[in-house]
Amino acid sequence: LVSTQSTWGLKRMISRLLPKCLPKNFMKSFSNMACTEPRKAAVLLAGCGVYDGSEIQEAVSVLISLSKYKYQYDCFSINKDQMHAIDHTTGNPMPTRNMLVESARISRGKMLDMKELDATKYQLLVIPGGFGVAKNFCDFAVKGAECTVDPEIEKVLKEFRSQDKPIALCCIAPVLAAKVFGKGATLSLGGKGTPSWPNAGAIDVCEGFGATMKHTTEPTDVCVDKENKFYSTHCYMKGDATAWEVLQGVDEMIKKVTEDLNSKIQLSKINLY
């Protein structure tokens, strides 16, 4: 029988039988090991601090999760002044600060100018939330439905999307994707209808941009848009979320991205064809 089997047919038969002959958890373990070289992620920071920059706990959760799943990462920001600076103890305005310089407080000094971001060198783009995303990366906080996205941010988003690479978005950051890509994008800003969701009005605005908005309520809920490779988790859109819940959500988001990236190369590692 084997002697009359075509080479292609024999390989196809082996490919069907092989998973049944392997230990029960082999394929799952294989998927986790599928990427032998470190992947690289680009992280966009909008300053330092929830009220005028990137939300620090979300940003740190991103860096911890990327490290956990064996990504190398670089942090980028726009080299210009923030919309404004806020005293986080009083809420009063302060002299404005440079976005890139402030972001370096989170990245331990290792920051790159957004102009240096080459999407071909990275497999993943991640944007933590914070009011800085809605004030510095766009003017959503001021203009709402009439907002525009900073040209540098729009350029990066479009480059990753055109290269079919995942874009992971925390908290308010899905607003950027909703505005830039509109119809066809599926995203989440959490839930609505209770005091736990003080900024739920953003959901309606994003739907006005044409995006499909999924309601998520649990800490580890992640909205996955398989077609566009958008991943979003609500983080502090839930006003009473804890730091632990935020970390859990971000971790689950990066985990899902990693699993999807691994699934693409899993079968190619067993070169039976």
Image: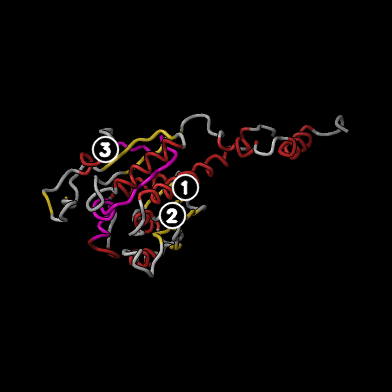
Mark 2, mark 1: which one is toward the viewer?
A: 2
Q: Where, quadrant-wise, is the C terminus in this rendering?
A: top right
Magenta highlight range? 113-141
Where residue 224 appears, as percent x and y from the top left, is 49, 53
Q: Which residue is mark 3?
A: 113
> Residue 138: where, in percent of width, then height?
27, 54
* Residue 6 colored in magenta in the image: no
Question: Dot 3 lies on which element?
Answer: strand
What mark, if any, has residue 252 been given in the picture?
Answer: 1
Relative to the observer, which residue lies in front, 169 or 184? Answer: 169
Residue 219 - label: 2
Q: Is residue 271 left or right of residue 80?
A: right
Q: Is residue 67 above or below residue 202?
A: above
Looking at the picture, tell me which residue is in the foreground, 143 or 94.
Answer: 94
Callout 1: few (<14), some (14-19), or many (20+) C-alpha neighbours within 10 Å?
A: some
**Is residue 163 left or right of 74 when viewed as pictured?**
right
